[in-house]
Image (cartoon, rainbow, N blue to C red):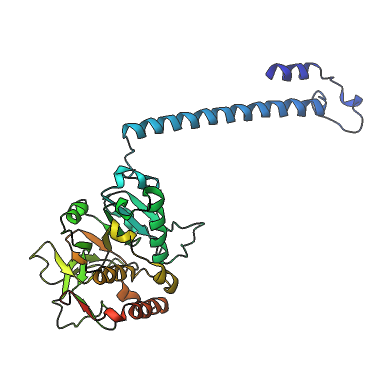
């Protein structure tokens, strides 16, 4: 193409300024049309070469990344587990457990936690806007993802499903082992919980003078300040686990087979947010089925809390519906069944 440019230049007629009709040109009076054509051809050649190099680089990078993946090599800043995408759900890496993060407040606190297992983000913000789905809608979508990857049989689900909001973090790399050590009759667990729930359905309201029914421990942060505190239940240091009625705190873990058989439709259709009530709802579902919930001892932290938001209109609506849904089972306690 460069030879063509030279030929075009060689064929140009050079005229003196006095011979150019209508417009004067500085210098030797090169005719404009021929020069424009030559410049355009040079520019097109540059763009073609640039596109070719870009394509080659992309193919080389793709081949290199694929080779690294096959060899199990990951970059230093990458999680050792797959994150966000759910393509790994059908693979053996997710057999023991998966960590499901529900998009609540567009916080990325969870990223400061440990890579305990493959992680799924439910409700990734789109166009810098928060997801409009409530927590129960996310759980239904998760059930569908697992069915697509592993089939309809609930027994094919990951053994444990760890669920948290995006304002919580888990720092315990041994959490799956702790879950696997639980009795077969224990189908849900968390870092903290309550031995009973009142007829009002407000499990988080307890008598300040008697907190003997609180179990577990976690760190409570604050989204608006640097303040934080320990939330410590009774007899925390005496045993690595206790039976509880309601799982509360940074996360809930539930056996995959049980999770896949829960119908979340009613709560999905009748709650505004659900992010403060799905743990209690799952706990009550286990109670109704005669299955146990347990408090275990992982290191974890949350920055959000129902107590901070109990006066929110949506939270009050959700609390009212949760109570009406489970009214026939309330009050409930670990000593009832």
**Whole-percent x, y for residue 170 in the image:** 26, 57
Quadrant of the rendered image containing residue 296: bottom left
* Quarter assignment of residue 189: bottom left
Residue 208 position by quadrant? bottom left
x and y, in percent, of residue 240 in the image:
12, 61
| Residue, far left | 238
Left or right of 195 in this view: 235 = left
Give the x, y percent position of residue 51: 59, 31
Image height of 223 relative to 309, above or below = above
Question: In the rendered view, would you say 97 is above or below 201?
Answer: above
What residue appears at the point 86 percent right and 31 percent down from the top-left corner? 24
Residue at image location 13% in from the left, 77% down from the top: 212
- Residue 149 seen from this side: yes
Quarter of the rendering occupied by the C terminus? bottom left
| Residue visible at 88% across and 33% down in the picture | 23
Q: How far from the left and from the top, in percent, is residue 102?
A: 37, 60
User: Left or right of 263: which side holds 254?
Assistant: left
Quarter of the image with the N terminus is: top right
In the displayed structure, 240 sits above or below 232; it is above
Residue nearest the observer in this picture, 265 or 80: 265
Foreground residue, 37 or 116?
Answer: 116
Regarding residue 201, the answer to whether it shows in the image is: no
């Amino acid at each position: 193409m460069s030879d063509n440019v030279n030929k075009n230049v060689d064929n140009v007629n050079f005229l003196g300024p006095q011979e150019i009709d209508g417009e004067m040109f500085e210098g030797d009076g090169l005719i404009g049309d021929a020069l424009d054509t030559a410049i355009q051809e040079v520019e097109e050649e540059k763009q073609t070469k640039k596109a070719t190099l870009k394509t080659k680089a992309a193919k080389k990078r793709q081949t290199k990344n694929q080779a690294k993946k096959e060899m199990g090599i990951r970059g230093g800043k990458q999680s050792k587990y797959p994150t966000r995408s759910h393509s790994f759900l059908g693979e053996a890496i997710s057999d023991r457990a998966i960590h499901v993060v529900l998009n609540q407040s567009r916080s990325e606190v969870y990223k400061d936690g440990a890579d305990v297992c493959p992680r799924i983000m439910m409700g990734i913000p789109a166009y810098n806007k928060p997801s409009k789905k409530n927590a129960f809608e996310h759980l239904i979508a998760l059930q569908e993802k697992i069915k697509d990857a592993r089939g309809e049989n609930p027994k094919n689900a990951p053994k444990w499903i760890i669920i948290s909001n995006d304002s919580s973090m888990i720092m315990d790399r041994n959490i799956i082992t702790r879950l696997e050590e639980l009795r077969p009759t224990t189908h849900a667990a968390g870092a903290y919980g309550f031995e009973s729930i009142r007829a009002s359905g407000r499990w988080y309201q307890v008598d300040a003078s008697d907190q003997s029914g609180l179990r577990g421990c976690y760190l409570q942060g604050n989204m608006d300040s640097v303040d934080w505190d320990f939330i410590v239940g009774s007899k925390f240091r005496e045993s690595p686990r206790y039976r509880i009625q309601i799982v509360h705190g940074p996360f809930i873990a539930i056996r995959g087979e049980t999770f896949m058989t829960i119908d979340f439709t009613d709560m999905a259709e009748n709650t505004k947010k659900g992010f403060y009530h799905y743990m209690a709802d799952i706990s009550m579902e286990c109670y109704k089925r005669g299955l146990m919930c347990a408090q275990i001892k992982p290191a974890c932290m949350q920055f959000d809390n129902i107590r901070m938001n109990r006066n929110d209109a949506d939270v009050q609506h959700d609390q009212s519906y949760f109570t009406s849904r489970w009214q026939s089972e309330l009050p409930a306690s670990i000593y009832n069944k």
